[in-house]
């Protein structure tokens, strides 16, 4: 294990990398489509990340841990003038999104199928307009809270790659993680919470597509919070 890897040990990916066996078409997509749209972190990042995409885009958004991919594909299709970078280490989730990309013909998505901190460390400074962290693993046991992706070191990473005025969007149905995120962002000099009243963080983001995770939370009686922080 390298020293660089050890330095990430409390903010990197934790959890399973693969679930049930992939269907034949999903496996084919991973073998043939993913290599064409996967970020090449072995090469230097371009000075202008918009050039990562095959057609001109005006903005770039990074979604960390896109799960089933419903949100990312929805946003990419509704906003073809924005380039989307999606990060998800879980193989089954990646296969599902790649299938959506093939089905919908979205050409404004690039992907990384490993640790999100690798992408954050690779990207140039002030290069990203928006970071989305939506329903991340809450690690509900207190002894595991150090595994939560929101941490001082990762907020430093967000602050480095976000443009001034860029935004960090966080959604969760777990109260302790919502409070954790509010506290960590409050203590970080680079971020300010944009909410002015309760409706600002209780109302889903504009154009928000309900996901299966959100539907499960509602069935189980949990309310979601939608937090927006501005890079100052």
Image (tube, rainbow, N blue to C red):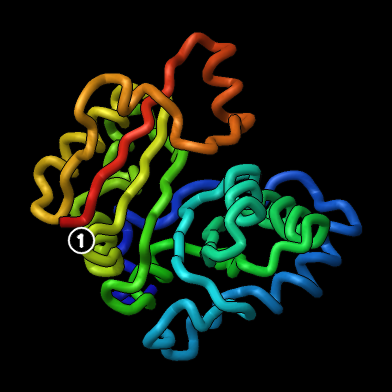
Residue 146 vertical placement versus 94 (above, below): above
User: Residue 47 location, x and y as percent?
Assistant: 37, 87
Q: Residues within 10 Å of mark 1 (few under 14, many from 20)?
A: some
User: Residue 6 location, x and y as percent?
Assistant: 30, 67
Q: Quadrant of residue 200?
A: top left
Q: Is residue 130 in view?
A: yes
Q: Which residue is under mark 1?
A: 156
Residue at the far right: name it.
24
Residue 201 vertical placement versus 145 (above, below): above
Image point 41% across, 70% down: which residue? 118
Residue 45 vertical placement versus 72 (above, below): below
User: Residue 213 location, x and y as percent?
Assistant: 57, 30
Image point 20% across, 39% down: which residue? 193
Residue at the far bottom: name it.
43
Q: Is residue 94 left or right of residue 201?
A: right
Tag 1, which secondary structure?
Answer: helix
């Amino acid at each position: 294990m390298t020293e660089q890897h050890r330095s990430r040990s409390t903010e990197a990916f934790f959890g399973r990398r693969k679930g049930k066996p992939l269907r034949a078409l999903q496996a084919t997509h991973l073998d043939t489509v993913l290599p064409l749209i996967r970020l090449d972190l072995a090469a230097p990042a371009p000075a202008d990340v918009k050039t990562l995409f095959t057609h001109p885009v005006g903005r770039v958004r990074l979604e960390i841990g896109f799960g089933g991919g419903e949100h990312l594909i929805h946003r990419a299709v509704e906003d073809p003038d924005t380039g989307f970078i999606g990060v998800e280490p879980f193989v089954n989730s990646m296969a599902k999104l790649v299938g959506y990309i093939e089905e919908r013909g979205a050409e404004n998505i690039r992907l990384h199928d490993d640790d999100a901190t690798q992408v954050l460390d690779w990207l140039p400074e002030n290069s990203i307009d928006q970071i989305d962290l939506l329903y991340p693993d809450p690690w509900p046991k207190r002894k595991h809270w150090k595994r939560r992706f929101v941490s001082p070191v990762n907020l430093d990473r967000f602050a480095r790659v976000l443009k001034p005025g860029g935004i960090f969007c966080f959604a969760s149905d777990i109260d302790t993680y919502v409070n954790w995120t509010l506290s960590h962002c409050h203590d970080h000099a680079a971020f300010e919470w944009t909410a002015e009243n309760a409706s600002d963080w209780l109302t889903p983001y504009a154009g928000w597509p309900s996901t299966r995770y959100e539907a499960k939370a509602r069935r189980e009686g949990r309310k979601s919070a939608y937090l927006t922080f501005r890079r100052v």
